[in-house]
Amino acid sequence: LDKQILRIPGPTPIPPRVEHALGQPMIGHRNPQMGELHARLKPKLAKIFGTKKDVMILSSSGTGAMETAAVNLCKSGDEVIVVVTGAFGERFADICDAHGLTTYRLEMNWGTACTPEKLKAFLREHPSVKAVFMTYCETSTSVLNPIKELTDTVRSESDALVAVDGVSCIAGVEANMDDWGVDIYVTGSQKAFMLPPGLAFVAASERAREAFKKNDHSRFYFDLNKYAEKIENNSTPFTPPVSLLFGLDEALNMMMEEGLENVFKRHRLMSNMTRSAIEALGIPLLTENKYASPTVTAVKPEQVDAEKVRKILIQDFKIYVAGGPKHLKGKIFRIGHMGYCSPADVFEYIAALEVAFKKAGANIELGAGTKAAQEIFLNA
Ligand code: PMP
């Protein structure tokens, strides 16, 4: 049976309601209907990001939005800090290097989060930085960095702008942009937003907007001044992926119907169920509970080869989980549980994982993981 079950940390499955919405007849991007669509999208997107300002929509994957943040906030020669907790922190730093910024990397061990203490000490070593770049959910390790505390730390130590990559968690966790004082959040459509890849979102504070205006670093398509001006008038500077915007409208409707608080609770519950199940099987996790992301879990089997487990999941069940990035290749696999994913889906992959661990030769008790997940569910 050709029934693939996508449990990688993005792209994620698309709800039938959203698939249906994606297929609506094309409209002109300067038609009045497009203005009405933007007017419906704006308040819903603003809620997801926790901001009163209009969220900008780009035709891009997440990386394009990261680069957009860097080149709009900073110019060549500016000093910046990049908090590197894994592969996506590295990517932010590489983007900064590519644009000639003077990049100071605050490197953490892969699997741990950055702490306010570490960031504070690093800020004191580099007092004249223009911006601090960080990753909210580090997808490569399944760490959720404490963005509120890290933003507080930057604010108490300097005037640096705070730029956050929220690609693999926003819409699944709190963003609280205005309350926390984050200056720029970027994210993509293919993860917790329950959409295909192709859209990116940028939310920006007043301070960030001032910085875009003053910044003369060269850019054209991704000049956020253009997007900021257009979105105020319910429009985009260039032709947007219209079908994806239809889908976005419906995906946001689904989140609003569920209630954002419930969306966040569901993600935390799925993470807790997954982690308890893996622990009950006696299999180690890469990250500590206190840094665990609600959207992705990295499993680090020691008795058996992680890649072997992953291959059995594909062969026997067509369940796709992600492997380990860079030096973690072969050592971990990562389960995505975000967007269109429910506790019932957790039971599905946990039961399948028990079979896969057993077949790979791990000494586990069948059903122990499922039972632990059931208990978490019942006690939630
Ligand atoms: N940042 C994070 C945290 C991510 O998880 C990803 C995608 N896995 C990206 C950036 C890059 O996004 P994209 O592949 O859409 O360019």
Image: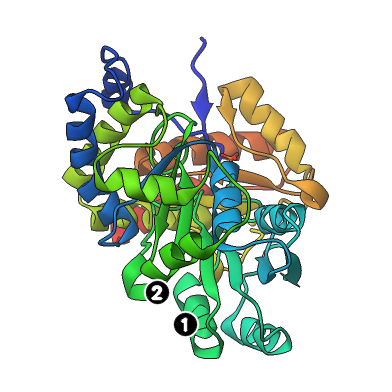
Q: Residues within 10 Å of mark 1 (few under 14, many from 20)?
A: some
The answer to whether residue 65 is above or below residue 310 is below
Would you say 310 lies left or right of 371 here?
right
Residue 183 seen in this snapshot: no
Amino acid type of the residue tagged 2 in the rendering: Gly
Q: Between 176 and 255, which is closer to the camera in this rendering?
A: 176
Q: Residue 106, position in %: x, y?
A: 72, 73
Residue at 35% x, 24% y: name it.
Answer: 242
The answer to whether residue 304 is above or below residue 273 is above
* Label 2 residue SS: loop
Label 1 belongs to which residue?
Answer: 152
Determine the CA span between mark 1 and mark 2: 8 Å
Q: Which mark is residue 91?
A: none
Q: Residue 358, position in %: x, y?
A: 67, 38
Q: Which mark is residue 181?
A: 2
Q: Residues within 10 Å of mark 2 (few under 14, many from 20)?
A: some
Q: Residue 224, position in %: x, y?
A: 46, 50
Would you say 217 lies left or right of 347 here?
right
Ligand 1 contact, mark 2 (Cβ < 8 Å): no
Would you say 46 lies left or right of 111 here?
left
